Image (spheres, coloured by chain):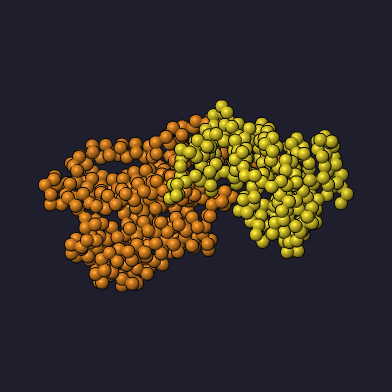
Amino acid sequence: MAKLAPSSVIRGIEGLPIILVFAFMLILFMYTAPEVFLQPFIYTTFLSTLPPLILLAIGLTFVIGAGEIDLCFPAIIGFSGFVFAVLFKEYNLGWIAVIAGLGSGIMIGFINGVLVAKVGIPSFMATLAAQFFWYGMATVLSGGKSYALRGAEESSVWKVIVGRPFAGTNMPDWVHQLPLQSLWTIVIVVFLWFILNRHRFGEHTLFIGDSNDVSRVVGIDVDREKIKIFTLMGALGATAAIMLTLENKNFFGNQGQGYLLTAIASVLIGGTSIFGGRATIVGTVFGCFIIGMIEAGLVATGLTGAWVRTVQGLVFMISIIFYLYVDEPQRRRALLARVGSFKGFGRMRAAE
Amino acid sequence: MSSQEGAAAPIRDYASMVRLEHVEKYFGAVHALRDVSLSIDRNEIVGLIGDNGAGKSTLIKVITGVLPPTSGRLFIRDEEINPRDFSVRAAHDLSIETVYQDKSLADKQPLWRNFFVGRQITNRFGFIDIKREKELANKILLDEIGFRGAGITVDSTVSNLSGGERQGIAIGRAMHYNADLIILDEPTAALGVAEVRKVVDFVRRIKDSGRACIYIEHNLAHVHEVADRLVVLDRGAIVSELTPKDMSVAELTEYLIQLQHKH
């Protein structure tokens, strides 16, 4: 029996295949659109626009790693963004608005977790329903209005969360544009990398994704851990919502809708298993870079925006097939068996 | 062979590991266990055989705290257990471990995580001491399970192991946690001949290390080889206890068929 499958070599460095794909695409875009990709400004722009996507995708990495799915987070972006924006603008509550926004996301995530773990609704249905509900709530409460946060850049909230600490210094222009949200995102990502790979909670997440039954037998409180996972997703969604609202200095009800597919695609492109049990934060971050870069790169290359989703979808599909082939030996065998090649199938049948 | 000797807390002496007296179990109107009295000695391998629906799993579930008995008494190490306080966790605390056919290991996780999950070695913030877990897992793998030179390391994922190797890992894990009673739930189901051989060897190790084992099995030949005693269940009642040493597999099979015809 082959113990050293090629997958174990590839998996030696976390996220290696996706890093190579990222490097390849970067070089490709440097060639097709040198005037954009050989200048620093596109990268500082990424630093200010990608953090919400990365935070959502990191939360989803836990959720999908645990074998569940969360479709609710675009509504968290809407609802928590609304809670934050209205308290910040209409009531001038500053940091209390930040805490309230975070709290609303945590609450939504917690409710999702209870619906999935305790009530027992499949996460796909529970979070889809929750998405409609919270998106609807945000629309009702805001009366469909958008909130422009004019003058927000004078507040300490803005300066700390999405500020530009080097603006107005003597450094080169691109340094002036370095945004603080990229720093916070790096801190959160590194912390959650340690949680997923080194902490009991991360290990439980992956075991739950592997098998709920095994997890129960070895003594994991599956329900409680699932509630925590969805709550974490809610907290990250709210953080993303606050960053997005502050960065745009504007809130509008459907500001989260564009993230549904891009965030899920980033996670799966990164190499987190669609079936749960295996998750990679490094992969997810590079998945986000790729999704973000396709958008900027295609437009800079001269294609119309209409191509962006098409190419993103294509990359998404190719990567899922790639990971299925490399990392899921059982499923690969089952797939091969279905199309007529019965190689290695005998072992999987129960011998009576 | 084990490294736990000396580390074990001095335990009061006891005669039998588990003893059941007149245990009855009803599921509504279904009489699942009928007046079951059974005792497992400290270093005995007891094979539990019987048809599907004979009550084997119900009996196991009563012993491991998954289900409370409707009536009857349960003793562990000669001490009576109150069914209300008994649970899976309590059974673990009393050093009873169950190895399920296919529910003991997580497929995509490395062996070292499978050894320690649920009992991780962590600092006080819950971060896992990976280096130490891997060292210990390696020791268990080499010394206790005896996977020398098999190309399996603590970093191997479970999906790369054969069915027999998986059972070995699960049994080795139970032994590492100082289980005094290891319950094997059909460990050879769905395995090939060579794999069955490995599992039987692991069961022998349980005996050699001075523990007790309840071994549920469909296949008479497998259980005949290792069991000290066979308990035959039929429709919820113990219908006979046999010593396999006195009989060949053929005689045993014949005996059981006779038993079926009596009804």
What tint does the image give chain A? orange
What tint does the image give chain B? yellow
- Above or below, A176 against A124 in this view is above
Q: Quadrant of residue B193?
A: top right
Residue A88 rendering spot, x and y as whole percentages: 26, 67
- Above or below, A132 against A166 in this view is below
Q: Residue at x 26, y 72 (%)?
A: A91
Q: Residue at x 34, y 38 (%)?
A: A19
Q: Quadrant of residue A149?
A: bottom left
Can residue A37 be seen at all in this image of the molecule? yes
Can residue B26 be seen at all in this image of the molecule? no
> Which quadrant would the N terminus of chain B be assigned to in this image?
top right
Residue A317 rendering spot, x and y as whole percentages: 41, 45
Residue B194 rendering spot, x and y as whole percentages: 66, 31
State the residue lying farthest toward the left.
A170
Relative depth, front residue between A271 and B41: B41
Relative depth, front residue between B84 and A98: B84
